[in-house]
Amino acid sequence: MIVAKLIDTTLCIGCKACEVACQEWNDQEYTLGTFGGTYQTMPDLEHNFWNLIKFNEMERDGGTSWLMSKYQCMHCADAGCLAACPAPGAIVARANGTIDFVHENCIGCGYCITGCPFDVPRLSPASKKVYKCSLCSDRTAVGLEPACIKTCPTNCLTFGARDELVRIAEARSEELKADGFADAGVYNPQGVGGTNVLYVLKHASEPEAYGLPKDPQIPWTVSLWKGPMKWLGTLAFWGTILGAFFHFVIYGPQDPAKHGHPEKEDAPSDPS
Amino acid sequence: MPKDSSRREFIKRSTKGAAVGGAVAATAPVAAAEGSPKLLKTAHTNQSTSICPYCAVGCSVVVHTLGDKSRNVKPAIVHIEGDPESPINRGTLCPKGASLEEFVQSDRRLTTVQYRAPGSRTWTRISWAEAVTKMARRIKDARDHGFETTDAQGRTVNRLDNIAMIGGCTDTNEINYLLSKFRFGLGLLSYENQSRL
Amino acid sequence: MTNGWTDVSNADVVLVMGGNPAENHPVGFRFVMEAKRLRKAKIVCVDPRFTRTAAVSDLYVPIRSGTDIAFLGGLIHYALSENKYQRKYVEQHTNASFLIAEGFDFSEGHFSGWKDGKYDKSTWQYELDAQGYAKVDPALEHPRCVFQLMKKHYSRYTPDVVANICGCTAEEFLKAAAMITIAAAEDKSGTVLYALGWTHHSFAVQLIHAAAMVQLLMGNIGMPGGGVNAQRGHANIQGSTDMGAWNMLPGYLKIPRANQTSLGEYLKANTPKPLRPNSLNYWGNTPKFMTSLLKAYYGPKATAANGYGYDWLPKVAEGADHSWGTFFDEMNAGKMEGLISFGMNPVANGPNTPKMIRALSKLKWLIVAENFETETAAFWRAQELAGKEYPQSVKAEEIATEVFLLPAACFAEKDGAFVNSSRWLQWKEAAVDPPGEARRDQEIIADLFLAVRALYEKEGGKAPEPVLNMQWNYAKPHAPTLREVAREVNGVDLETGKQLNGFGELKDDGSTSCGNWIYSGSWPEAGNQMARRGQVDPTGLGLYPEWAWSWPANRRILYNRASTDDQGKPWDQTRAPLRWNGKRWSGDTPDYKADASPESMASFIMLPEGVARLFAPDLVEGPFPEHYEPAESPVDNALHPNANANPMLKTYKSDMDAFGTAKDFPFVAITYRLTEHFHYWTKHTSSSSELQSNFFVEVPEELATEKGIVSGTKVRVSSARGDLEGPALVTKRLRTLKVSGRKVYQIGLPIHWGFVGKVHGPLINKLTPSAYDPNCGTPEYKGFLVNLEKLG
């Protein structure tokens, strides 16, 4: 059975309980947040911070709007990180659809970072390994929901069989349409074969407003790498011959929009 | 009343899953297959139920401790999570509640009695016995000094107004009741439990 | 809460005002979201700030901090003038029909009887007949009946007047009014969720009275999905209040006054008489509650001959006040010798921090029992730790206060019961032992009390009887178990030695003891009801009668008798907490005699009127709520400029109690909590410090543009009490308001930092005034004046 996580953004109150539950369950070290002119004090995901609520403050429909949405590994059906990974057994697609990193096999090459169209995996400078949300594979293995879902107070997060959640998400978006939100819909991007993290959005035609890419694709460089040029990649992995060329394969291309601060219109100075 | 039964059912199943999962994990071979998910950290814990000490929603929590009731073992808290049986929180918690384990085991917790002498720039560690002797003396002296048995009109008033007592809203009913006995035993009038602050 | 958290999901409309549950009670907010999702309930959020609650509401209306009574008064006017109130409910279940004495009036901002800065309340009373019962006009037409007086009083609160005072538009107000009054239909309910946004004002009690009036007009009191619901900010603030206040004994029994020189006189003064022939007047049982409390306190020493030890209780001088503001003022004046604090941090949470610090430095000694070193325990280090921020503080060498800092157990290290906002007493278990030498509070209290008692036994001293006679008969006197204490609180039949089943069994002849009558039934012979974990929900309303135990009598919805009409027919058959079968009431524990027919008595059994009070003669500044400006306000009172602030406002006159005006301090400041922190505790934990490490000042976009401020710019916020600095957070969420024809800006100040902890920042209460509500002594932490300057 493929499992999934459903995020109904219309019920998110930005309380960050999922952020804390993720860190507590996974024994992540806490770091001091920064001040960036927003309630979002962690600017982005980190190797030890796998679940982020993005806050987007804007004027729309003649009033103030404050959209909050959860950002973490999407557990893609067609996972770019897995496609890009050269280390045997380092990235595993489990039978339930979870994309899990097995750290004893990770060589820290960072190819998965390039391969991810959602900009999720992060390299730890200390361990030189790459980390991201595992969908709490230790919990799901024994029939428990992931920690973020367990803690979510408003039923914004649901865990269960993917097929059922897709049905629930579609029914919810129909309900929202009936309530007058004509643009409501489900985010389940097909460019990566669909994701095991599904979103219900009030403004489904503009996922960017929630910090989600409109039409994510596995980068062409990775498709190339795992396709006709796989032999070349293997060579590059062991050797240094084409290092300069593969620097681009590994680290680029960069999408500046993905790295900016969500409420960056007034770039703040350091408050301290 | 319509409720979110699907979620509740799921949580129920999850709780059962935890028990079953725990048993499976406990009997699984030590060397799990390479690449298997890690062992559940609550697989071998004792569980106590409690209530979150922060706001007054009254979320039930389950405190998981390792180190059972054996002698010479100091239990440690490995995890605090929402109690799925509570009709209030149904297993969920807010960001403060979700990190209660860190609150209980904070490295800033006080573990010794500290004393600051008049004019001193520092804390000094003293024993409980010394502290209790000194505090009781201060309270008695102040009470003897400030107690009013009758007022100007000769009416019995048995009151004390040179000692104030505050607190209570962070502690249980029973502690508050004991504080009331302490307070009225002394005859103390100035009292605030933070219900107004 | 009259109702409870789980009941909120029964609402058709949720008015969130004076609270921000999505941020401060996120788990309680799940029931709001459930109502929205499953019942299609409308959420109306009225708040000075666009909060995380506003973000998921159907309608957000901004208002100026401290103008809530104007808004609610507007709702009352709207409901009455648009005929959007539940007429039958108002007729049957409120004092709308009661006649008020001749001479009652309101003009120029004052009710009748205002003279020399005081009220003579003789005209605020009901007109009584020869038997002492209030006269009524069931048709609600008599010009002196409460209904007509109320209509007249609120006729001034038109949508334009509301908009002009609150700073929203009349259209926004009308949209909100239309949505909120959906609940006027007999088969619709609306709930009101509030918190410190209402209580932190110098007219807090009247504000909640106004909300109760709105809810009575809508027929929402006693209804599932209805009620007036205080969300409460600390785990056991409800329970500690149930156990007394400076002017209360446990169970809301009034503290004796000096003129009540015997138990008989006390009971005479404090036992109400019924005001209508059909009023049950449950407080008529006061002699049973009080005698049983005295038996719990003084045990065998309490006898009929000595008035059950009544003499040993302290008696407060008539008219005297020993609330927070008063005793800290006395402390600041050097009149207090000692302070004992169990888990409270006045340097952080009292208004006017510099005054708090100076007051503590005048003490001879201070005892603090805590989990962490707090600003209060460390007040003498203010100069060393944050001298720049507290320039008035003096060097430690010059502070003569002796300080004892006692390491206390935290929640997980003790058992006992917390009472949540729903009035549910929930028992917790001890999971681990306290760390190091930390001790459980019951042991600390017992040790201290017994050591003082031993000194009196040994040395004698002033009035030893109250100390010696207080019963302390626990199996291990130095370490009482909370189970023993809970059983004592529940009450015992002293003849059989058996636990009481409830307060119905209490006697006034000394044969029962009970530490708190409203908790009687929590630990009967059948055992600890507070630890129950039953999941059943027979009414289907989410009342969960077998989960924990709710005071009083395990009743989950207070005033539930009003959920039916005078014939016992539920207003809404689909949401009936009570049903009458001709012989008994079933469902929730009835707030009524269980076998009394619907016609036999009036519905509000706790009140001498037998019905709910729209007109409340016992409050100090008037029987109807009236809009007064906060103690510091940017504008004159638009309704009556000569009665600007609350006429009965409580302030103090020390050299540290300055007030400012709009000339120097043009902006309105509001203080509040953030989701990520809990009060002043979580600055000791890393997770909350990660989620909100830094203090910041929220600044409206338009003001920021005027002053050249961007997010991150260092700003100084100052009031007449002091100033502080921090980075600005420029936001659209604080809208510019138009009040009395001029622009008003509001500045947002989150509260969670201080000078000890993992993260540091200014204490917001440096800025707040010593202005207090005259009914209950709550400080005005919200809606005071500040200035804002750009620094960096």
Image (cartoon, coloured by chain):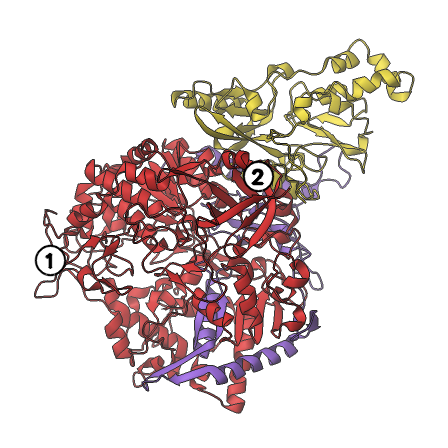
- Figure colour of chain C: red
Q: Name the residue under label 1.
A: C135
Relative to A259, say whether C706 is above or below: below
Chain of the residue that carries numbered disc 1 in the rendered image = C
Q: Is residue B66 left or right of residue C490?
A: right
Q: Is mark 1 on a helix, strand or loop?
A: loop
Quadrant (top left, top right, bottom left, bottom right) of the C terminus of chain C: top right
Residue A171 in percent (x, y) is at 45, 22
- Looking at the rendered image, the disc whose residue lies closer to the viewer, 2 or 1, is 2
Image position, residue C117 (x, y; %): 29, 64
Is residue C441 at all visible to an observer of this figure?
no
Identify the chain drawn in purple: B
Write the residue at 41% across / 31% down: C37
Q: Where is residue C689 in the image (x, y as percent from the top left)?
A: 63, 47
Outermost front residue: C663
Do residues under tags 2 and 1 come within 8 Å of each other at their CB atoms? no
Image quadrant assignment for residue C523: bottom left
Q: Which chain is yellow?
A: A
Residue hosting label 2: C729
